[in-house]
Image (cartoon, grey):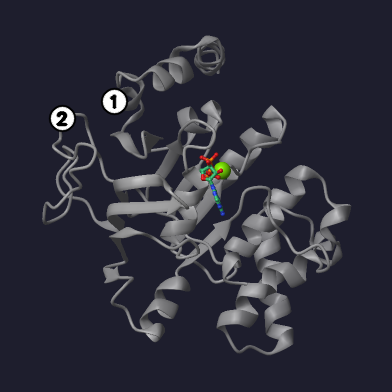
């Protein structure tokens, strides 16, 4: 049930040549500067190493997520984007490294401190991951039941508010996931991620499987929520439209670490075969052309 929490954050810039080369880890102290002065990191990961069996998926990975930003996390299929997300929210054990969330070192935090931190984020898992036997309203209430002690009438009111916030009609609350379209499922999952009024939301491929209009609408929604609620957003995505339209910074995952993080231009120009194909291939050119016509 912890999986229903969610949160958002930004990744620190690991510009090429910044000294955080593979294997070296980052032992630097103090906030990471990104050229615009020091920024407030909601999440700070250092030397994160995660593996299964004999293979490490992530090795000495450094990442900062800044308050109020939408950070887009990209990378080839199977590079460990979802593993990274699950690691940050404590659902995946680490083999090494430290994670600091909202100024709290997760490993040395007491259970109560960790619980307080967990309440500050919400998660939208890849595919939505709603409980199929629960209605939308009941799904949205899962994190509330886990973390809060509220009367059921108040929980109903709160769930209805979240459902309206994500642009679903009121009657969607009593529907089961099987009765919803793909876009409605994503919105319902987002409503659940927002259940505890998080400061940070983690979104794992929120627009995958949506048609371009549905995906653009969802991007608009995330952007609006970020502006009105002051959210920080950690968003794994394959969607170039999302990267171009709503992400403030991008972090590219590859070679078991963050290859490069920064603004679109910085990441696009990073010399790496996957990045070149992704940002400069046929599909990217079509997206860029479409964007410039808008
Ligand atoms: N529970 C697990 N057990 C073993 N291997 C896993 C597990 N979860 C993920 N992996 C492996 O970790 C790698 C990264 O997976 P994932 O983070 O899901 O990739 P993606 O970047 O596409 O989200 C893949 O090779 C995957 O097979
Ligand atoms: Mg994934």
Residue 39 appears left or right of 10: left
Residue 131 appears left or right of 198: right
Nearer the observer, 72 or 230: 72
Q: Which of the two labelled residues, at mark 1 and mark 2, occupies the earlier sequence position? A: 2
Please report the residue visible at 30 percent of the width from the left and 46 percent of the height from the top.
61
Image location of residue 70, percent across then percent down: 42, 45
Q: Is residue 11 visible?
A: no
Nearer the observer, 24 or 155: 24
- Per the rendering, the mark at residue 1 is none
Image location of residue 258, percent across then percent down: 33, 39
**Label 2: which residue?**
17
- Looking at the figure, which quarter contains the N terminus? bottom right
Q: Label 1 to label 2, Cα distance in Å?
A: 13 Å
Please report the residue visible at 28 percent of the width from the left and 70 percent of the height from the top.
105
**Label 1: which residue?**
266
Q: Callout 2: 10 Å neighbours few (<14), some, many (20+)?
A: few
- Looking at the figure, which quarter contains the C terminus? top right
Report if the CB atoms under discs 1 and 2 are less than 8 Å apart.
no
């Amino acid at each position: 049930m912890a999986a229903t929490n969610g949160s958002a954050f930004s990744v620190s810039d690991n510009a090429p040549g910044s000294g955080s080369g593979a294997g070296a880890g980052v032992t630097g102290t103090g906030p990471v500067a990104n050229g615009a002065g020091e920024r407030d990191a909601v999440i700070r990961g250092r030397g994160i190493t995660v593996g299964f069996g004999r293979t490490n998926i992530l090795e000495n990975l450094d990442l900062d997520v800044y308050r109020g930003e939408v950070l887009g996390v990209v990378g080839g299929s199977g590079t460990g984007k979802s593993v990274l997300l699950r690691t940050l929210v404590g659902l995946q054990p680490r083999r090494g490294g430290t994670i600091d969330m909202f100024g709290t070192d997760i490993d040395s935090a007491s259970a109560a401190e960790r619980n307080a931190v967990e309440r500050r984020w919400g998660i939208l898992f890849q595919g939505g991951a709603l409980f199929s036997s629960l209605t939308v309203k009941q799904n949205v209430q899962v994190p509330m039941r886990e973390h809060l002690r509220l009367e059921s009438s108040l929980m109903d009111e709160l769930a209805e508010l979240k459902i309206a916030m994500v642009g679903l009609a009121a009657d969607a609350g009593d529907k089961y996931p099987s009765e919803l379209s793909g876009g409605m499922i994503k919105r319902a999952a987002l409503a659940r991620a927002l259940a505890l009024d998080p400061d940070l939301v983690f979104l794992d491929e929120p627009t995958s499987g949506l048609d371009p209009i549905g995906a653009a609408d969802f991007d608009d929604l995330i952007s609006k929520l970020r502006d009105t609620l002051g959210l920080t957003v950690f968003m794994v995505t394959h969607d170039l439209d999302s990267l171009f339209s709503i992400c403030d910074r991008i972090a590219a995952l590859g070679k078991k670490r963050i290859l490069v993080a920064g603004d679109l231009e910085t990441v696009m120009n990073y010399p790496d075969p996957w990045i070149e194909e992704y940002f400069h291939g046929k599909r990217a050119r079509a997206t860029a052309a479409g964007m410039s016509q808008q």
